[in-house]
Amino acid sequence: MATLNIVILAAGKGTRMHSDTPKVLHHIGHQTILAHVLACAKQLQPEKIIVVYGFGGEQVKAAIHDDSITWILQAEQKGTGHAVQQAAQLLNEDGQTLILLGDVPLVDVYACQQLLKQSATGLALLSFNKSDPTGYGRIVRNHQHQVEAIVEHKDATELQKAIHEVNTGIMAMPNRHLNKWLKQLQNNNAQGEFYLTDIVGFAVEDNVAVTAEVTEDEWSVTGINSKTDLLQIERVYQTRLAQKLLHQGVTLKDAQRIDIRGSLTCGRDVEIDVNCLFEGNVVLGDRVKIGANCVIKNATIQTGAHIAPFTHIDDATVGEQSRIGPYARLRPGTLLAADTHVGNFVELKNAQVGIGSKINHLSYVGDSTVGKNVNIGAGTITCNYDGANKFRTIIEDDVFIGSDSQLIAPVTIGKGATIAAGSTITKNAPADELTLCRAKEQITITGWKRPQKIKK
Ligand code: UD1
Ligand code: CA
């Protein structure tokens, strides 16, 4: 294919977002609105991507941080034609240019490819039929149904205002024509702007073919101007991701109540209950079940594991057939082998846990290596932090830690050792023995009375 230049118009202020963040830096799913447009642009393998920016430009550049993009400042917003003029000196002499809008995140690669086929020889527009076309440029066609002009809403006659076919703003054309037409633009119109859409009239004058491809997918050409638009597009985007999962055979209890901000890869017969949020890269193996209200980020959950409701997982791996939650928290660096059990109100951080080990209730296990078939009783705390430094706790295979124990790191509990409930362990415990550390004897004070409330 001939050389392709893509110009993305993104100089708009986005006043109606009522935000200090530039409009194109708000997020849809895991990435910014502009990043979605750039992802589409890159799939078309252009020779050049030029982003025309204005308001908050430095912030936009820093956030996108991509050396393959050429950034052009449009200091004053004098219209879409003026915006493209700023990029004119960068356009190749031959080849084609595709114009995209920086605030239309669901732009469709396939529709762009269709436009580029048309624009090899002429001007190709993407249009759609809008039930309420107020504000949009109208596609004016002649009796042979050929496109004659685009007339902006504010410049339109009553008859033209009745047209429902509108300009999406996405278009493509040969560079040799665009370079000529950009020089011809004038701002003698209702808004005093340089309209890019005036090139349609120039094309007709120059006998260059003009085509308008009508898209059925309105969301793929919808721009974001307000928080309401942002919400609507987010929901459309999420619904589409959910539909993809359903097509792959994933069971979703409610396709409207799942959010994916990143990539979610699922094996066969995966079930996901309501209100789950997946962030970053999440991989769920075959027959994994995720209970309601889980937040799972950058994690791998292996075959047959069940995650019960209200569990938070961040940067962790859960081994096959494991049972996690409800109300468990797996923090970064947690690596659970197969058949592990982690129960309610258990927090794990940078902890490697061996096959078949159980930490079922109310515990904190951090900076620890836990062997196979270990049972950690309720309320066990690894004291890994002395206020300045962190230390590791090593718990070898087949250890039993009694409830309400504190293991003061650095410390090693030898293979097969038992720690009696309520112990505070400060020294290594030998293998296969019972170690305990409590007050020497249990005493009873007979006749003792509980304090009474003092009457005033
Ligand atoms: C434009 C089209 C209109 C179309 C509509 C679709 C023109 C003259 N009109 O309308 O036919 O129906 O889009 O939404 O082209 N921008 C700049 N610099 C500027 C002006 C705009 O970069 O000086 C960018 C905006 O950031 C936005 C895009 O161009 O991404 C469209 O601008 P916007 O003001 O939303 O559209 P209109 O000009 O009203
Ligand atoms: Ca405008």
Image (spheres, rainbow, N blue to C red):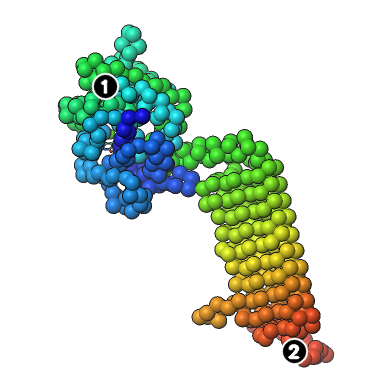
Residue drawn 67% across and 86% down? 427
Q: How crowded is mark 1: few (under 14 residues within 10 Å), some or many (20 or more)?
A: many
Q: Is mark 2 within 8 Å of ligand 1?
A: no
Quarter occupied by residue 323: bottom right
Residue indicated by mark 2: 439
Secondary element at image label 1: helix
Quarter occupied by residue 245: top right
Q: How far is mark 2 from mark 1, CA to CA?
A: 91 Å
Residue drawn 48% across and 45% down? 29
Vertical arrangement, residue 93 with respect to residue 52, above or below: above
The answer to which of marks 2 and 1 sits earlier in the sequence is: 1
Residue indicated by mark 1: 200
Q: How crowded is mark 2: few (under 14 residues within 10 Å), some or many (20 or more)?
A: few
The mark closer to the camera, 2 or 1, is 1
Residue 163 seen from this side? yes
Relative placement, left or right, of 327 versus 188 is right
Relative placement, left or right, of 399 versus 130 is right
How far from the left and from the top, in percent, is residue 92?
25, 34
Residue 308 seen from this side? no
Residue drawn 34% across and 34% down? 100
Vertical arrangement, residue 336 with respect to residue 13, above or below: below
Q: What residue type is labelled 2?
A: Ala
How far from the left and from the top, in percent, is residue 78?
21, 36
Q: Which amino acid does label 1 sit on?
A: Val
Rendered-image quadrant of the C terminus = bottom right
Vertical arrangement, residue 370 with respect to residue 219, above or below: below
How far from the left and from the top, in percent, is residue 130?
41, 24
Secondary element at image label 2: loop
Rendered-image quadrant of the N terminus = top left
Q: How many marks?
A: 2
Relative placement, left or right, of 105 versus 299 is left
Q: Tell me the quadrant of ligand 2.
A: top left
